[in-house]
C-alpha cells in the first residue's frame, strides 16, 4: 500500500447519533474516489479520530509515532462557555504538532482554535443532513403522525429531541449546557399564551425534562427511538422546535427542523448562529433568554410559507451531497504527500 493513500475512519458506535456522521463521511469519501479503510493500526496513512477526546488521549502518540497524519472533529467544548473543557483543550494544544487538520462545525469553535495556534489547520464543515430522511411536512403527514402518536390535531406541539440528562439512564440530573432549565422556563411563559400546548420529546435521559413538564402541568409525549432514521417522522407532528442550549456543536436538530419545514427557534449556539437568519429562515435568541425564546415561538406559530421555503433551501445547501467540495479540500492535500 502506498504511503498516505488511505483514510482510516473510526468504527461506528451503535446507538450514538454521531456514528451516523461517520457513516455519511465514509459515503462522501467513496463518492469522491478517496480510499477509505476501517479502523485499525496503519503506517503512514491518514487517520480521522473519533472525537476531541480521542485527540487528547495517549493513543494519538502511537498513531503519530507510526507516521500517520491525524485529523479529528471538534464540535463543542469552549472553555469560555464550559470551563470543564479547559484541561481538554490544553491537552490538545500540547499535542498540536501531531495534528494536520481539525474539522469544526461552526464559527465559535473555529475562532477558539484559530486563537489557540491552530490557524490554517481548522476547517469549518457544518454537521450535514441526509435530506431523504427529512422530507417537507405536509398537512397529511402531520395528521397521520399525530394520529399514530395520539396527539390531538388541535394541539400546538413544541419539539425537543435532544438528550439533556446526564448519562444514559433516567436522566434526572440535567446537563445544563443543553439548557433544559431554560426550555422549562420558556414553557412556563408559553403556557399562559398557548391554551392547548403540548411538548414532544424523543431520546434517552429525559427525566429532568419530563419531571419539569409534569410540575408545570404541561402535557407531553416521550418516545425513545431505536433507529435514528425514524426521527424525521416525528418532526412532522410539530408546530415549532426549540433549541435552548448554552453551547452546542450542531445540534443536528437545526438542519433537521429546517429541512422538515418546522419553524426553528434557537439560542445563539453552535451552527444555529451561522445558519439561521433571524425572522428569515428561523429565529434566534440570546443564551438563557427564555422570554425571547417564548416571543420568537409566538411569532413562529404564525403561518409563514416564505420562512419554510428559506429554511428548506438552507438545509439543501448543507446536505451531505453539497459538502463534497468541502471534504475534498479537507483531505486531498494530505494524500500522496
Image (spheres, rainbow, N blue to C red):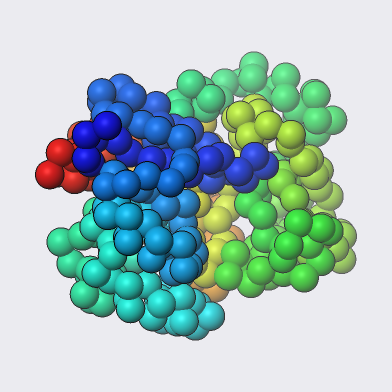
Task: Quarter of the image for the N terminus: give it.
Answer: top left
Q: Residue at x 81, y 43 (%)?
A: 221
Q: Position of residue 48 (x, y in %)?
A: 37, 48
Q: In screen coordinates, is 160 left or right of 310?
A: right
Q: Position of residue 12 (x, y in %)?
A: 56, 39
Quarter holding residue 286: bottom left
The residue lying furthest to the top in this view is 140
Task: Quarter of the image for the C terminus: give it.
Answer: top left
Q: Residue at x 67, y 42 (%)?
A: 15
Q: Residue at x 77, y 70 (%)?
A: 173
Nearest to the observer: residue 161 or residue 115: 115
Seen in the picture, residue 236 relative to 242 is either above or below; the reply is: above
Seen in the picture, residue 27 relative to 183 is either above or below; the reply is: above
Q: Is residue 16 visible?
A: yes
Nearest to the observer: residue 259 or residue 167: 167
Q: In screen coordinates, is 93 left or right of 194?
A: left
Q: Position of residue 175 (x, y in %)?
A: 66, 69
Q: Is residue 256 visible?
A: no
Q: How many marks?
A: 0
Nearest to the observer: residue 326 or residue 316: 326
Quarter holding residue 46: top left
Q: In screen coordinates, is 182 left or right of 105?
A: right
Q: Residue at x 45, y 26 (%)?
A: 131
Q: Position of residue 240 (x, y in %)?
A: 58, 44
Amino acid at each position: 500500500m502506498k504511503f498516505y493513500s488511505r483514510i482510516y475512519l473510526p468504527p461506528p458506535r451503535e446507538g450514538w447519533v454521531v456514528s451516523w456522521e461517520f457513516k455519511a463521511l465514509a459515503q462522501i469519501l467513496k463518492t469522491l474516489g478517496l480510499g477509505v479503510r476501517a479502523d485499525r493500526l496503519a503506517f503512514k496513512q491518514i487517520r480521522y479520530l473519533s472525537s476531541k477526546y480521542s485527540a487528547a488521549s495517549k493513543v494519538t502518540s502511537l498513531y503519530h509515532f507510526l507516521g500517520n497524519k491525524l485529523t479529528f472533529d471538534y464540535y463543542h467544548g469552549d472553555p469560555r462557555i464550559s470551563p470543564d473543557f479547559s484541561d481538554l483543550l490544553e491537552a490538545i494544544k500540547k499535542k498540536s504538532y501531531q495534528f494536520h487538520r481539525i474539522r469544526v462545525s461552526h464559527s465559535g469553535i473555529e475562532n477558539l482554535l484559530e486563537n489557540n495556534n491552530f490557524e490554517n489547520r481548522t476547517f469549518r464543515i457544518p454537521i450535514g443532513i441526509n435530506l431523504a430522511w427529512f422530507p417537507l411536512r405536509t398537512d397529511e403527514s402531520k395528521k397521520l403522525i399525530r394520529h399514530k402518536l395520539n396527539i390531538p390535531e388541535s394541539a400546538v406541539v413544541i419539539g425537543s429531541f435532544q438528550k439533556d440528562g446526564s448519562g444514559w439512564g433516567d436522566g434526572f440530573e440535567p446537563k445544563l449546557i443543553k439548557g433544559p432549565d431554560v426550555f422549562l422556563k420558556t414553557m412556563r411563559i408559553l403556557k399562559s399564551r398557548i391554551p392547548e400546548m403540548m411538548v414532544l420529546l424523543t431520546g434517552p435521559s429525559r427525566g429532568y425534562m419530563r419531571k419539569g413538564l409534569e410540575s408545570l402541568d404541561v402535557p407531553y409525549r416521550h418516545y425513545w427511538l431505536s433507529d435514528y432514521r425514524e426521527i424525521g417522522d416525528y418532526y412532522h407532528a410539530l408546530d415549532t422546535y426549540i433549541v435552548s442550549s448554552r453551547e452546542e456543536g450542531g445540534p443536528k436538530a437545526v438542519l433537521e427542523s429546517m429541512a422538515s419545514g418546522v419553524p426553528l427557534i434557537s439560542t445563539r449556539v453552535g451552527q444555529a448562529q451561522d445558519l439561521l437568519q433571524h425572522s428569515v429562515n428561523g429565529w434566534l435568541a440570546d443564551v438563557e433568554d427564555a422570554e425571547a425564546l417564548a416571543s420568537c415561538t409566538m411569532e413562529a406559530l404564525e403561518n409563514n410559507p416564505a420562512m419554510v421555503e428559506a429554511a428548506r433551501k438552507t438545509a439543501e445547501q448543507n446536505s451531505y451531497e453539497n459538502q463534497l467540495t468541502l471534504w475534498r479540500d479537507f483531505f486531498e492535500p494530505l494524500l500522496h504527500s
